[in-house]
Structures are given as structure tokens and as C-alpha cells.
Image (tube, helix red, strand yellow):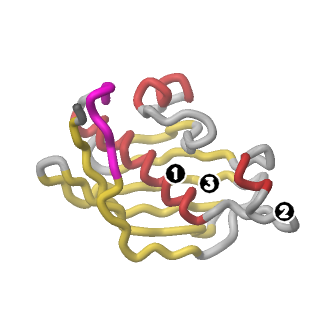
Amino acid sequence: MIMDIHQILKQLPHRYPILLVDRVIEIEKGKRIKALKNVSINEPFFNGHFPHRPVMPGVLMLEALAQAAALLAFDTLGVKPDEKSVYYFAGIDGARFKRPVEPGDQLVLDVRLDRMKASIFKFSAKAWVGNEVATEAELMCTMRTIA
């Protein structure tokens, strides 16, 4: 299954400047997702991180991976989030940043579902630039109903 930006906007509540998934290129229901984030010099965080050498903040790479993970979770459960549900980080383990991500790079977000129990999901996630790992982590996320 492939998702363009219009389909992603129907799934994720995030909007500019925090929407960090541009396209989904593969989903294996209940197993894995591969998505893209095109990194542009026009990203607002580059103004301050860093003016002399723009580098994408590591926490935003983790956020991009979590957004891809959310799309996988929704597809796995066969649900569409609504205004009464929120998808949160529950934990990040083993985060490693292997190479800087700069304007012009394309992040390939590769997320695998390791476990799902109740509303807790555990994922193995890597973001690639070309054939190099830019960041990797184990992510735990949860879906909650809000009032």
C-alpha cells in the first residue's frame, strides 16, 4: 500500500511544521512500513540548528520515525484516528545518531512492529540516507482516548 500526502493528512493529526512524513512507499500490515521525509532548507528548524551548518535535529528524526510508526499501527488495527484519540511516545530506547542529516537529504523511514499488547506498540526503527543509517532506536508508543 502506498500513501501520498493527502492520505497521510487524513491519518495523522500533525500539520506544518511538525508533519514529518511526506509519502509512504510500502506497508506490510502488522509488520513494517517504509516512508519518506524530504529534508529541505526551508524547514523552520534550520534557522537556528545551526545557522553556519544546517543539521536536522535528532529528536525530529525520532519524531518522523514515530509518525511512520503511527501510520503502521493504524493500518495494523484497521482504524482511523479521530479527535478523541491521541498517539503518544511511551519510550525511546537505544537511540543512536550515526550521521548528520542535511538539507537535500531524503530520509527513508523504516519501521518494524516488534510487539503489540493492548494499546502499547513496540517498534524497531531506522532512518536511512542512501545506504547509510542516520538514526536508529526502539520506540514504544501508545494510543489513548482523550476527553
Span highlighted in magenta in the image:
80-88
1 and 2 marks in contact (CB < 8 Å) = no
Between the C-alphas of marks 2 and 3, the distance is 21 Å
Q: Is residue 84 above or below residue 97?
A: above
Image quadrant where residue 18 sits: top right
Residue located beneath label 3 in the image: 107
The earlier-in-sequence mark between 2 and 3 is 2
User: Of tags 1 and 3, which is closer to the observer?
Assistant: 1
Q: Disc 3 residue type?
A: Leu
**Residue 110 drawn at (x, y percent):** 47, 55
Which numbered circle lies on residue 35? Answer: none
Is 51 located above or below residue 18 in the figure?
below
Magenta stretch: residue 84 in it?
A: yes
Q: Which residue in the structure is indicated by mark 1?
A: 64
Of circles 1 and 2, the one toward us is: 2
- Label 2 crowding class (10 Å Cα cut-off): few <14, some 14-19, many 20+? few
Give the structural element (helix, strand or loop) at label 3. Answer: strand
